Image (tube, grey):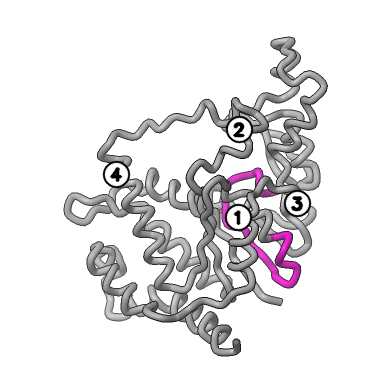
Amino acid sequence: MIKTLLVDGDNLFKIGFHGVKELYNGGDHLGGIYHFINILRKFLEEHNHDKVVVFWDGDSNSSVRKSIYPQYKANRRQDMNEFKYESYLQQKSRVKQYLEEIFVRQVEMTNNEADDLIAYYTKLSVDEEIIIFSADKDLTQLISERVTIYSPTSKQYYGYGDMITINKVNIPHQNVLLTKILTGDKSDNIDGIEMLLKTKSGTFGQDFFEINKKIVDLHNPLITEEGKELVEQIHTDTIDPTDRGYKNLMRMMMEDGLFKYLPKNDEAWVNFLKPFMKLTRKEKRNTNKN
């Protein structure tokens, strides 16, 4: 069975950008770039995946859910100053360039959230053994006998039959959806039944369960037709190797000053590149077969 790694790109990138604050090249922050690429390298080294797909939130990614529930993510604010936000966008764009060179597939589509794109991929890929790399507990709904979650914050794997901690309570992963429907999600500004009872609000009325289920249920992802087409293409197509390769990756690392943060020995850069070169060889073999 094909071993596939699905990465929640924005989730992993934000951890490095906000958490790795000490890495700079001149005056340019590198935390988001270095953390993303290095964590991916370590994971490939440990698990020897055949395919890696990184999913990104598209522009206006909340639009479908907001059409159902206008308050969705209304509590989110962009609180970075102009300089930091520019660095955030630049580093995220640069990560995408790195991924192109190391034969990592990427999915991003306007009006689509990464969670839904990931969920749709798991529905398609019945012949793949999948690890989803994300700290987002919404994705634990997707756990099955062939889908496992790895959380980079807890550094734990969550597989079939495991318990998931939500609101400090351990529940079977099969009950994550029901829990989300009933309790809502403060981070996404989704009210649960407790808030409904406290405020005696008629906002949901009889539609409370139906609306909450629609916006939290990843077994029925809210994905556009364009999003479906892209995920189907990424799932089945091979990668065009033209103008991609580790030499471009090395050039980019030198330009960005990443080599100075590798261990100080002669084999450091070789060891850093090995997992990516192994993935590259696998993807090239798939291309040649077709």
Image height of 111 relative to 147, above or below: above
Question: How far across and down, in percent of the image, does residue 94 sit?
Answer: 34, 59
Q: Which mark is residue 66?
A: 2
Q: Can you tell which of label 2 and label 4 is closer to the viewer?
A: 2
Q: Amino acid at mark 1?
A: Gly
The residue sitting at the right extreme is 206
The CA distance from mark 2 to mark 3 is 32 Å
Label 4 belongs to which residue?
86
Which element carries disc 3, helix, strand or loop?
Answer: loop
Q: Amino acid at mark 3?
A: Asp
The CA distance from mark 4 to mark 1 is 27 Å
Is the Cβ of the residue at disc 2 closer than 8 Å to that at disc 1?
no
Label 1 belongs to which residue?
227
The residue sitting at the front extreme is 225
Which residue occupies the foreground of this view, 111 or 202? 111
Q: Can you tell which of label 3 and label 4 is closer to the viewer?
A: 4
Q: Amino acid at mark 4?
A: Glu
Query: Mark 3 or mark 2, which is nearer the start of the sequence?
Result: 2
Is the Cβ of the residue at disc 3 closer than 8 Å to that at disc 1?
no
Which residue occupies the foreground of this view, 131 or 280? 280
Work out which quarter of the rendered image holds the N terminus and state it.
bottom right
Q: Can you tell which of label 2 and label 3 is closer to the viewer?
A: 2
Question: How far across and down, in percent of the image, does residue 221 sit?
Answer: 69, 48
The CA distance from mark 2 to mark 1 is 17 Å
Q: Which mark is residue 162?
A: 3
The CA distance from mark 3 to mark 4 is 40 Å
Query: Mark 1 or mark 3, which is nearer the start of the sequence?
Result: 3
Which residue occupies the foreground of this view, 191 or 116? 116
Question: How far across and down, in percent of the image, does residue 242 sit?
Answer: 41, 81
Q: Residue at x 59, y 25 (%)?
A: 71
Image height of 205 relative to 284, above or below: above
Q: Residue at x 70, y 69 (%)?
A: 129
